[in-house]
Amino acid sequence: MIRRPAVAGQFYQGSSAGLLKEVQRYIESAAKEKVMGIISPHAGLMYSGSVAGAVYSRIEIPHTFILIGPNHTGLGKPVSIMSDGEWEVPTGALKIDKELAKRIMQGSSLIQEDSAAHLMEHSLEVQLPFILHFSSEVLIVPVTMMAYSLDVCRAVGLALADAVQDTKYSVTIVASSDMSHYEPDSAARAKDKKAINEILDIDPEGLHKTVTMGNISMCGIAPATAMLFAVKKLGAKKASLVKYMTSGDAGGDYSSVVGYAGIVIK
């Protein structure tokens, strides 16, 4: 199956030449480091591209990215994976790591094959232009999460960790998430700082509790929590905030913003 782009020309430039130029604007010169997981945003590139670009500029590109995003559309299974095919954007296509995807599904009955959840979902698609900037050979495993209970996040995260542990090549887990939505800039920054601190502590339970109890509208709470469970089991020791900004910094309107955080974990 070829998964065609759903938000080309909306969230990012729709032509190959335009997208190449757009992504290049956000790439930074930085020392590369091997990481287990990252947090990367998924808004339109004009708003969150500089955060995503900063994160992907910082990391060594692995053999495979596991991409976990929230399900904004409501389509498909509660936890949906694509285990075969490739994903296209205007600048190229990335193939799915079939073997790793199958091992992930074997690790938890909650993770089910379902392409419908991915057809119109943008949270993973907007990662691809940055990944393709650095490599067209890397493989991907796309996962979306509609269910977000702590038990589901734990089960998914541990299944990912078990699958990665059985893999002989490098794997990085990407949790796609924006932070606070439609708050005044100062309120968004205060709330997001609390959630970011839990991520920097590599504390999945703490993040889940802080976001749910603190009324923080972080859309990728499930992907981020699952990723933290996974990297914690894999032995992660350190997390670093690469960049934080809000949509106000890009568009100039600070009255109602969305927050974006880029974090690496190793």
Image (spheres, helix red, strand yellow):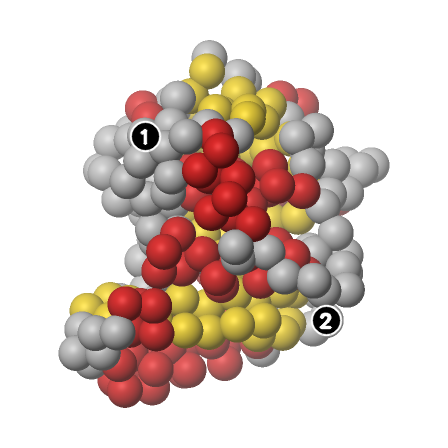
In the picture, residue 121 is in which quadrant?
top left
Categorize mark 1 by other alpha carbons within 10 Å: few (<14), some (14-19), many (20+). some
Which residue is pictured at 46% across the width and 15% down the height?
Answer: 2
In front here: 82 or 125? 125
Label 1 secondary element: loop
Categorize mark 2 by other alpha carbons within 10 Å: few (<14), some (14-19), many (20+). few
Say whether marks 2 and 1 touch (CB < 8 Å): no
**Image location (x, y in percent) of residue 41:** 43, 57
As drawn, 98 above or below 172: above
Task: Name the residue furthest top.
Answer: 1
**Image location (x, y in percent) of residue 88:** 48, 24
**Image location (x, y in percent) of residue 103:** 63, 29
Q: Of callouts 2 and 1, which one flags the residue occurring earlier in the amino acid sequence?
A: 1
Which residue is pictured at 34% across the width and 51% down the height?
Answer: 44
For badge 1, the amino acid type reads: Ala
202 on left or right of 234: left
Which residue is pictured at 55% across the width and 45% down the height?
Answer: 130
In the picture, residue 11 is in which quadrant?
top left
As drawn, 64 above or below 26: above
**Mark 2 sits on what residue?**
237
Residue 79 appears in the rendering: no
**Mark 1 sits on what residue?**
6
90 on left or right of 242: left
Task: Name the residue furthest right.
Answer: 168
